[in-house]
Image: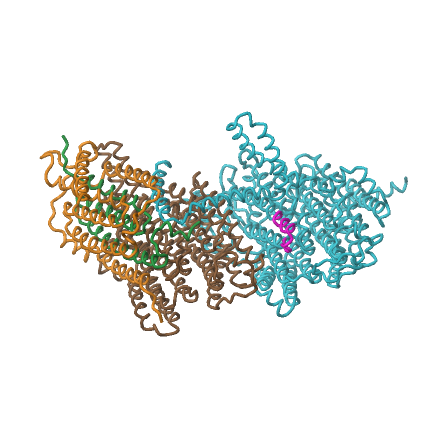
């Protein structure tokens, strides 16, 4: 039996979240203190980053306290390597989103305080999503991320697009969480508890009990309908977070309308947390462990195949819809849908290698996608347009940004020797490892999709390097931005050739509580 | 002769009907506030289920009721944010008809 | 008559001596070679590709700014400096390598492990053995010269920095290709040179034809790469590889580690110093599976009775690998059983090795422009001439030859693969040479000549004469670079005129260019004592003598005949180009055309090129001369220097190839040599008679007499068109046929006639319209259309999104039951 | 007055229909099989369920946003009544206080602010009704089947329970403490977010 701590003992393992919560409130108050300062953006950024750094330190301390998974707060939360991994990822993406907000100027300076404080609160939400084993905590985590995100999407006050995006986001999010809650109510009805640890064993026991009692097959069939409906509805909530087909449609609109720094955040942070949650539900709860593979589903429901079909659809829709886009933010939105599809391949692999490849890809994706949005943000701000037209001849107008953008785009395509290749390679490897016919089919679909994606990524690169600019005027990218871009490019390049450490980190994180 | 005494399935039917009607509301209404009402219906459907399951649970520990209380709180928070955003949209575009809010498309 | 007998006796005596000497050398080499490859660890090899990489990065990032601020010389000096540094480092490595005992000539520089996934272990490791050393010297030396040449050639181009950045990047990729010690690095380089080739062909991308040529090169190479990768996967599988073990063993305790626990980490880091041997391997048992090792390993270490193949106590590690050295060791050391296993394995009934060889060769046909994927190379002449010289003559296109020679131990095991290679090479050589007869564009002549010469190289490596093929690669690099650069000089001198009909008499205006071109012509035509003579003759002789190395011994004779005829053709078209260009009267206009081009001094008489260009030409001509001594002199009893130099690399295949040879007497070798000399002079004489000073009217008469044939050859046998008509028309006709069927069913027989008419028109129109990129457009339009349809789904209407979400969820529920 | 009467009639008829269905659908037999056919408590259930469902129909189909809002009140009240029947008194009270006292007022407020009631004939227009009806039918079928037939973890005879408020309080501050604390952060963040979105710009 796994150790479960009570409230008081759990606090020692809850430092990161406590620090962030206190930090969020602290930054909010600090905002009042520096309201008059002309350098308030700098101060707020530094303060928020400090809070995140403290949280990261606390995370490493907490992770060191217990190398094996333990349950916290009477089993509502859990601390296992999987959760720790995504906590680090959340802090990192939050830090980057705060870092790029200031120079982007899309967040008005008097709103910077709220922006930082709210993002810190979202970070807590993402951490909860990654570490909850109780449906109640899952909902609260998802909603904490969502609620704040709605507001942040509409952060640009007098911008029609921004408020429209927020409206779409809030209504869609509301419906999605409603579906998830309804599904959870059914799961509660089937399980008798809201805690998902040991779900699989419990469900199987119930099935055995029913069989023993000689319940007719039709009833067992209806039980499966109820279970499938329940899990699919729960996954709708998660699928909306990771923007997978058919719950992806909010994504392009919201990404386009929201302030770019927040879009960048949205495309990585909540998505990563969503994947953490999806893996936890599908393979922590809805499957029975069988050796190294996590594939034997409860009641013989073929989750891996279903996720595989969704993955294939998601990447196809994302890539093909991106082909004709001329607004780069929107194109990147579709591209991020496609990437959700790729990552779902790792989930569909239904193995330890699969989960590992998901974790690994998300790290790589963090750098390259944030980098891409960073360039779009800065070019959008300095030239006032997100159209591909503005990117013609960018290599002459802002050479470094153009080169960096090209690197990110090629990495997103998955060309060696960039980090994106490494990530994709592992996803495909995880699938091919499993070796079934539909896994191979999915891998081929994925490969074809990668080829398609090259088309629209390369179109931008071509525009940047081969087309004539419509104006010779240089785009003066701030040094801070160049520094950040350089760092991200460096990471993308370094991880492209030297990533064994990353691989081992992702590998060691594949330890899920309650699943042994 | 069967009894008419309501059991668990009766409550679940009510929940299912509320959910289906809520869904119908959100997919057909064009008034943003109307859509939000549909969301409230969906959340209520989940709540009815939770409370009913909790009541009929052979080993009652009230977790369903607690869950439903949290859902109510979440619904309230959701409504607050949503209506704030609706107001913001209204201030920007002078309408809250979602069929007219399609600047972002394709 | 008496005299003739005397000569014959002398020749026979000399040849016998040579044969004995050669046999003696062979025997000694064979005994010594087939152990584990010993090597020396060094730490500086990475510098060789590093310099060009730095040059490329600096020029790419700040080149434009540097050029603006300080002028072009900074940019060019930087690139040339990088090349010079690379060359000097390569020379140091060469000295180091020479200092090693003959069979320990392998320098290895391990940097780090790039990734390990299951059995796939790819290290960033550079290695230099005699073969790659030769390649590196060619690349850096000729590369450096061509950089210098480019300074003059590109003097008027505003984007100099970009050009030099690409060139440096190319050299970097090429070095990666030849220096990498494993397939992964080779493939990185393989792709990298393809990319650079694409960039450089399309350097003047504003010209749509050039951009199209670039795309064509890229697409054709992708097809080849597909074959290459497939072959690689198959080989890996055959060696027992898996992507990752599905058992519960953690990765760091995989089979390698278990094989030698003491060297757990060392083994991973250095790509194999621990070895297990397994004499029990057969086609049915995969090498060294985890269970096997565990079962056989004793607590003390190695299982008793296992024969551990050793030389100096080294053990051979058996199993899937990507490293060339490990692969060589496994195959070369008989007791590992791997050779036995590989030759026995079949894949769907086909011998696996043949399949692997052919698939890898498919990659080579694209990169090295062989039938059927040669079509891109002539078009690639759209790029700047230095590029043609460096990439499309001297280095990149030889990558396929290099790859076959590098994997000689693998190819030698399958006579099927060897036959395919040799026959393809022969066919390509003849085919391309015949097109070269009638081309009027000087660069096109050289392009087809290159294709033809590459064919020769493949004949060489195909019949097992790896050293001869490699030697031809070396000599060709020099004389073809010299010819290309000479043509570049001519083109520049004639104000960007490429048509030989508008040249003539350039001897007077461009003396130095003429001299070097003349010497290169002598070399390529195979005049006695020129370097081309030795290399080509050795290839032809080995083809004639191939015996059972090919599927049928008679095939060797046929290939020899084809090669012989091709040699005649080679001499003819090369001399034709020489006479057309340099003799007679200048036929170009005198200051006739005033173009708006950036070329400042347009018009006027031809002029000699700047010194930076002519000196490079001279250097290459000298190089042509010096390389003679590397191949001197097989028949006279001296073992050629290069053959001896390459011996350690080729040793694993040597015995096998030699054993299968036909071993014709030395007389035959002399006779064949005489025949080669005869065709060299014959071709020259014919060209001289027909084209010298443009006096003869015979060519025009012939062309007029056989207009169709002339046209046919001039238009390259319509291969491009045939590709379009067959491949593309098939796709199109298929689509149309479906359409037609639909119409027939729907509209009934009445409309059938009209439909057929429309169908014909459509096909006709389609062939016209979709000539080059038809298939590409077809697919692309489809994709874009699909994309547009998907976009339309995204209506911007919230209620539609919500509907999709809920209905989608229901669909997923349904899907769950459908999947079951 | 006519509307209210019609409303009441429809509710009663729905209640009767529901009770009738209970006898026809085998999956709905769940309760005890002896005792009187229809007790007062059972009748109250059918009435409350009908209030909730009929009001929900009105929310979904009404052309006027104000009617929809009032019908929502009915649906929420009906659900609250069901909670009472289910001995969830604390939840029922919370439903009244938060939902009806808070959310509904908020919604009404928004309706007043954003719609010119009385001017437009249809303040709550609908689109793609047919597609919506198809979805409604599909959802109803799937969920109804699952609800009626699935082997829920449930007892035929629910235990009698005392008042729940005290025990829920214990749970909030005991077992579910962390959720209770985190949701306060959520509410705070939501509050800040809502204010930031809705407040007027500060002019400096």
Residue C461: x and y, percent? 67, 44
Q: Residue at x 44, y 38 (%)?
A: A437
Which quarter shows the C terminus of chain D? bottom left
Q: Main secondary structure of the magenta part?
A: helix
Relative to C177, does residue D48 appear above or below in the rendering?
above
What color is chain B drawn in? green
Q: Position of residue C315 (x, y in %)?
A: 53, 49
User: Farthest residue toward the bottom?
Assistant: A37
**Residue D182 in view, yes or no:** yes
Q: Residue furthest front?
A: D119
- Rendering quarter of residue A71: bottom left
- Chain C visual colour: cyan
Tell me if residue C214 is in the magenta stretch: yes
Q: Colour of chain A?
A: brown
User: For this view, does D73 lie left or right of residue C275?
Assistant: left
Residue B28 occupies quadrant: top left
Provide residue C591's location: percent of width, then percent of height: 79, 58
Question: Which color mode does the image show?
Answer: by chain
- A495 w.r.t. D53: above or below: below
The magenta segment is C202-217
Q: Give the left or right position of residue D132, taking residue C758 as reference.
A: left
The reply to whether the magenta stretch includes residue C229 is: no
Q: Which chain is orange?
A: D
Residue C266 drawn above or below residue C795: below
Q: Position of residue C798 (x, y in %)?
A: 36, 49
Q: Where is the N terminus of chain D found, in terms of image quarters?
A: top left
Foreground: D60 or C444?
D60
- In the rendered image, the residue lying farthest to the right is C2
């Amino acid at each position: 039996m796994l150790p479960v701590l009570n409230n008081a003992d759990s606090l020692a393992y809850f430092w990161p979240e406590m620090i962030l919560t206190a930090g969020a409130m602290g930054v909010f108050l600090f905002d009042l203190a520096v309201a008059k300062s002309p350098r308030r953006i700098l101060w707020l950024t530094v303060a928020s980053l400090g809070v995140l750094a403290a949280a990261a330190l606390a995370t490493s301390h907490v992770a060191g306290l217990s190398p094996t998974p333990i349950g916290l707060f009477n089993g509502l939360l859990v601390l296992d390597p999987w959760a720790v991994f995504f906590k680090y990822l959340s802090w990192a993406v939050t830090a980057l989103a705060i870092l790029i907000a200031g120079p982007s100027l899309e967040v008005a300076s008097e709103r910077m305080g709220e922006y930082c404080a709210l993002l810190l609160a979202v970070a807590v939400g993402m951490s909860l999503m990654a570490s909850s084993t109780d449906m109640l905590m899952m909902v609260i985590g998802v909603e904490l991320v969502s609620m704040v995100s709605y507001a942040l999407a509409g952060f640009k006050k007098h911008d029609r697009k921004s408020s429209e995006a927020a409206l779409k986001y809030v209504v869609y999010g509301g419906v999605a969480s409603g579906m998830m809650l309804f599904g959870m109510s059914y799961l509660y009805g089937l399980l008798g508890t809201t805690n998902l640890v040991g779900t699989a064993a419990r469900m199987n026991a119930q099935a055995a009990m029913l069989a023993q009692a000689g319940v007719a097959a039709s009833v067992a069939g209806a039980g499966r309908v109820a279970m499938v409906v329940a899990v699919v509805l729960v996954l709708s909530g998660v699928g909306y977070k990771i923007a997978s087909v058919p719950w992806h449609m909010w994504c392009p609109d919201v990404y386009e309308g929201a302030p770019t720094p927040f879009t960048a955040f949205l495309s990585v942070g909540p998505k990563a947390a969503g994947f953490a949650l999806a893996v936890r539900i599908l393979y922590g709860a809805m499957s029975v462990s069988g050796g190294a593979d996590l594939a034997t589903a409860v009641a013989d429901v073929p989750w891996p195949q279903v996720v595989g079909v969704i993955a294939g659809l998601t990447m196809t829709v994302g890539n093909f819809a991106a082909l004709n886009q001329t607004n780069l933010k929107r194109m990147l939105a579709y591209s991020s849908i496609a990437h959700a599809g790729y990552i779902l391949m790792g989930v569909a692999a239904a193995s330890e290698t699969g989960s590992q490849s998901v974790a690994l890809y998300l790290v790589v994706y963090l750098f390259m996608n944030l980098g891409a949005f960073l360039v779009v943000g800065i070019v959008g701000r300095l030239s006032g347009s997100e159209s591909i037209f503005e990117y013609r001849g960018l290599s002459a107008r802002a050479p470094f940004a153009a080169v960096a953008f090209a690197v990110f785009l090629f990495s997103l395509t998955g060309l060696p020797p960039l980090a994106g290749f490494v990530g994709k390679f592992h996803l495909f490897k995880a699938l091919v490892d499993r070796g079934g016919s539909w896994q191979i089919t999915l891998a081929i679909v994925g490969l074809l999709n990668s080829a398609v994606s090259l088309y629209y990524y390369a179109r931008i690169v071509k525009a940047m390097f081969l087309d004539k600019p419509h104006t010779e005027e240089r785009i003066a990218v701030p040094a801070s931005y160049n520094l950040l871009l350089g760092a991200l490019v460096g990471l993308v390049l370094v991880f492209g050739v030297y990533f064994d450490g990353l691989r081992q980190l992702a590998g060691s994180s594949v330890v899920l509580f309650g699943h042994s | 002769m069967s009894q008419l005494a309501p059991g668990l399935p009766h409550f679940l039917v009510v929940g299912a009907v509320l959910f289906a009607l809520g869904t119908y509301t959100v997919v057909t209404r064009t008034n943003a506030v109307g859509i939000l009402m549909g969301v409230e219906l969906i959340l209520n459907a989940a709540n009815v289920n939770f409370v009913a399951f909790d009541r009929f649970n052979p080993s009652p520990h009230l977790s369903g009721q607690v869950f439903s209380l949290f859902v109510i709180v979440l619904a309230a928070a959701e409504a607050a944010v949503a209506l704030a955003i609706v107001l913001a949209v209204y201030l920007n575009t002078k309408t809250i008809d979602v069929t007219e809010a399609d600047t972002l498309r394709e | 008559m008496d005299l003739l007998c005397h000569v014959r006796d002398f020749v026979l005596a000399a040849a016998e001596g040579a044969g004995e000497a050669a046999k003696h050398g062979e025997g000694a080499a064979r005994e010594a070679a087939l152990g584990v490859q010993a090597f020396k660890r060094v730490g500086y090899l990475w510098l060789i590709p590093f310099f060009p990489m730095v040059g490329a990065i600096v020029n790419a990032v700040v080149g434009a700014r540097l050029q603006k601020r300080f002028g072009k010389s900074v940019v060019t000096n930087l690139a040339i400096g990088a090349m010079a540094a690379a060359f000097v480092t390569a020379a140091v490595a060469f000295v180091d390598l020479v200092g090693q005992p003959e069979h320990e000539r392998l320098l290895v520089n391990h940097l780090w492990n790039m990734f390990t996934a299951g059995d796939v272990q790819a290290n960033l490791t550079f290695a230099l053995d005699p073969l790659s050393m030769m390649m590196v010297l060619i690349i850096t030396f000729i590369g450096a010269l061509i950089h210098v040449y480019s300074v003059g050639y590109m003097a008027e181009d505003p984007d100099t920095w970009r050009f030099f950045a690409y060139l440096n990047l190319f050299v970097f990729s090429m070095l990666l290709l030849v220096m990498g010690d494993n397939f992964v690095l080779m493939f990185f380089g393989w792709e990298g040179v393809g990319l650079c080739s694409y960039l450089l062909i399309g350097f003047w991308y504003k010209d749509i034809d050039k951009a199209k040529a670039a795309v064509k090169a890229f697409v054709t190479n992708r097809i080849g790469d597909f074959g290459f990768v497939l072959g690689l996967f198959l080989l890996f599988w055959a060696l027992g590889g898996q992507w990752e073990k599905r058992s519960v063993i953690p990765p760091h305790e995989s089979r390698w580690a278990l094989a030698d626990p003491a060297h757990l980490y060392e083994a991973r880091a250095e790509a194999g110093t621990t070895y297990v041997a397994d004499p029990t391997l057969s086609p049915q048992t995969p090498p060294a599976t985890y269970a096997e090792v565990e079962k056989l390993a004793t607590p003390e270490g190695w299982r008793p009775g296992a024969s551990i193949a050793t030389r100096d106590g080294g053990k051979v590690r058996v199993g899937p690998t990507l490293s060339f050295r490990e692969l060589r060791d496994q195959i070369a050391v008989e007791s590992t059983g791997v050779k036995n296993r590989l030759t026995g394995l079949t894949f769907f009934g086909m011998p696996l090795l043949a399949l692997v060889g052919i698939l890898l060769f498919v990659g080579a046909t694209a990169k090295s422009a062989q039938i059927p994927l040669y079509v891109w190379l002539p078009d690639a002449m759209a790029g700047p001439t230095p590029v043609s010289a460096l990439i499309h003559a001297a280095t990149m296109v030889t990558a396929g030859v290099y790859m076959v020679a590098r994997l000689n131990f693998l190819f030698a095991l399958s006579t099927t693969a060897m036959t395919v290679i040799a026959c393809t090479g022969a066919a390509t050589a003849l085919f391309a040479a015949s097109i070269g007869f009638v081309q009027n564009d000087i660069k096109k002549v050289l392009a087809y000549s290159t294709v033809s010469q590459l064919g020769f190289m493949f004949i060489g490596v195909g019949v097992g004469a790896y050293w001869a093929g490699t030697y031809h690669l070396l000599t060709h690099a020099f004389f073809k670079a010299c010819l290309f650069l000479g043509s570049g000089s001519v083109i520049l001198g004639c104000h960007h005129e490429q048509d030989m009909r508008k040249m003539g008499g350039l001897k007077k205006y461009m003396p130095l260019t003429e001299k070097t071109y003349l010497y290169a012509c002598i070399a390529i035509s195979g005049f006695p004592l020129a370097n081309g003579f030795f290399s080509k003759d050795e290839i032809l002789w080995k083809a004639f003598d191939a015996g059972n190395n090919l599927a049928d011994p008679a095939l060797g004779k046929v290939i020899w005949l084809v090669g012989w005829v091709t040699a005649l053709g080679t001499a003819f078209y090369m001399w034709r180009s020489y006479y057309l260009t340099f003799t007679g009267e200048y036929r170009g206009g005198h200051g006739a055309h005033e173009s708006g081009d950036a070329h400042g001094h347009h018009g006027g008489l031809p002029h000699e090129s700047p010194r930076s260009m002519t000196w490079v030409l001279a250097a290459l001509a000298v190089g042509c001369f010096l390389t003679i001594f590397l191949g001197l002199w097989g028949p006279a009893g001296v073992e050629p220097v290069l053959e001896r130099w390459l011996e350690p690399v080729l040793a694993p295949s040597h015995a096998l190839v030699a054993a299968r040879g036909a071993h014709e007497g030395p007389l035959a070798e002399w006779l064949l040599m005489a025949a080669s000399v005869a065709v060299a002079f014959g071709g020259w004489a014919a060209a001289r008679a027909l084209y010298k000073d443009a006096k003869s009217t015979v060519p025009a008469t012939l062309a007029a007499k056989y207009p169709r044939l002339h046209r046919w050859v001039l238009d390259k046998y319509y291969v491009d068109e045939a590709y379009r008509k067959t491949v593309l028309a098939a796709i199109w006709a298929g689509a149309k046929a479906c359409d037609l069927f639909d119409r027939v069913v729907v509209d009934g027989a009445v409309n059938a006639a009209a439909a057929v008419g429309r169908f014909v028109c459509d096909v006709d129109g389609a062939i016209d319209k979709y000539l080059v990129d038809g298939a590409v457009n077809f697919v692309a339009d489809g994709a874009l259309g699909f994309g547009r349809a998907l976009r339309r789904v995204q209506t911007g209407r919230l209620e539609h999104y919500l509907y999709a979400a809920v209905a989608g969820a229901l669909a997923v529920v349904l899907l769950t039951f459908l999947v079951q | 007055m006519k509307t209210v009467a019609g409303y009441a009639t429809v509710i009663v008829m729905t209640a009767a229909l529901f009770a009738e269905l209970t006898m026809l659908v085998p999956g709905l037999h769940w309760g005890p099989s002896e005792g009187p056919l229809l007790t007062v408590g059972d009748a109250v259930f059918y009435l409350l369920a009908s209030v909730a469902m009929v009001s929900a129909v009105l929310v979904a189909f009404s052309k006027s946003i104000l009617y929809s809002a009032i019908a929502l009140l009915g649906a929420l009240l009906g659900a609250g009544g069901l909670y009472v029947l289910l001995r969830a008194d604390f939840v029922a009270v919370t439903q009244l206080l938060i939902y009806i006292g808070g959310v509904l007022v908020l919604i009404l407020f928004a309706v007043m602010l954003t719609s010119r009631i009385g001017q437009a004939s249809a303040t709550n227009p609908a689109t793609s009704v047919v597609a919506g009806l198809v979805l409604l039918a599909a959802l109803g079928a799937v969920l109804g089947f699952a609800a009626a037939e699935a082997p829920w973890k449930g007892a035929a005879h629910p235990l009698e329970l005392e008042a729940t408020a005290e025990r829920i309080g214990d749970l909030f501050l005991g077992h579910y403490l962390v959720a209770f604390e985190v949701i306060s952060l959520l509410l705070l963040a939501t509050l800040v977010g809502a204010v930031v979105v809705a407040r007027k710009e500060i002019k400096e």
